[in-house]
Amino acid sequence: MSLFEDLRAAALPEWEAYTGHAFVEQLGAGTLPLPAFQDYLVQDYLFLVQFARANALAAYKSRTLADLTASAAGLSAILAEMNLHLRLTGEWGIPREAVESAPEKLATVAYTRYVLDCGQAGDLLDLNVALAPCTIGYAEIGERLEPQLERVPDHPYGAWISEYAGDDFQQAAGRAIAQLDALSSGSLSAQRFEELLGVFRTAARLEAEFWQQALAADER
């Protein structure tokens, strides 16, 4: 198995709490309240600003052309994702200036700064493991939710689902999985795997808290 598959299997409760969160299930069914989705989009844009910085940090930490190329591809995918967010918020009457000037909420700060701290304190593998739940998890969610587009006519969140189920994002996730294997080539010690597993579990928990933040915004 790949390193990602090993990490996913060892952190399955956290992974399923993230990828099967109520926010995700409601989004797939088309029943997610629009205010919750709008709040999520704004916060996710701010989240992606920090993730773009994390991929830039990955490039800085890279020592080979292959690692630099992988970091550049990750940054490119995030920039494309940010454009999607601005297009969707614009369609709902939220101007770009309002999105970019919105304050970061606590779950946004907690997750993004955790990832950046992993990159600053650890090595390139630590950083890529911290980034993995976002890229690979969204691809998994998009692929799983895509059949809902056929079941729900005029799905309100069809553009979001199509983006993450689409070939470009699925390929980005595949590259992220391959990069984890490239960085961990050779056998990892049991201690090193446990260190990486701790990073992976924390990132998955923070992803779930990010979804919950959006649901809580709608409840207030």
Image (cartoon, rainbow, N blue to C red):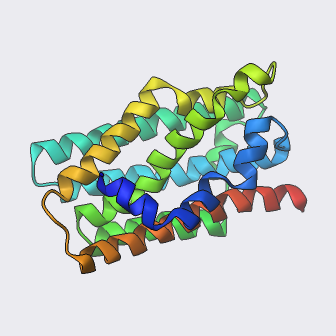
Screen quadrant of the C terminus: bottom right
Q: In this view, does 195 lie to the left or right of 220?
A: left
Q: In this view, does 56 lie above or below 90?
A: below
Q: In this view, does 76 lie to the left or right of 157?
A: left
Q: Is residue 9 above or below residue 29?
A: below
* Residue 68 visible in this rendered orientation of the protein: yes
Q: In this view, does 123 lie to the left or right of 83?
A: left
* Residue 54 visible in this rendered orientation of the protein: no
- Most extreme residue toward the right is 220
Q: In this view, does 77 lie above or below 130?
A: above
Q: Is residue 48 above or below residue 16?
A: above
Instruction: Judge by depth and name the residue closer to the eye, 171 or 66.
Output: 171
Residue shown at 25%/48% (left/top)? 179
Instruction: Judge by depth and name the residue closer to the eye, 159 or 141.
Output: 141
Residue shown at 56%/66% (left/top)? 14
Residue shown at 74%/46% (left/top)? 25
Q: How many labels does the image show?
A: 0
The image position of residue 140, as x and y in percent, is: 52, 42
The image position of residue 129, as x and y in percent, is: 35, 61
The image position of residue 17, as x and y in percent, is: 63, 61
The image position of residue 141, as x and y in percent, is: 58, 42
Q: Is residue 210 left or right of residue 197?
A: right
- Most extreme residue toward the bottom is 191
Residue shown at 29%/75% (left/top)? 121
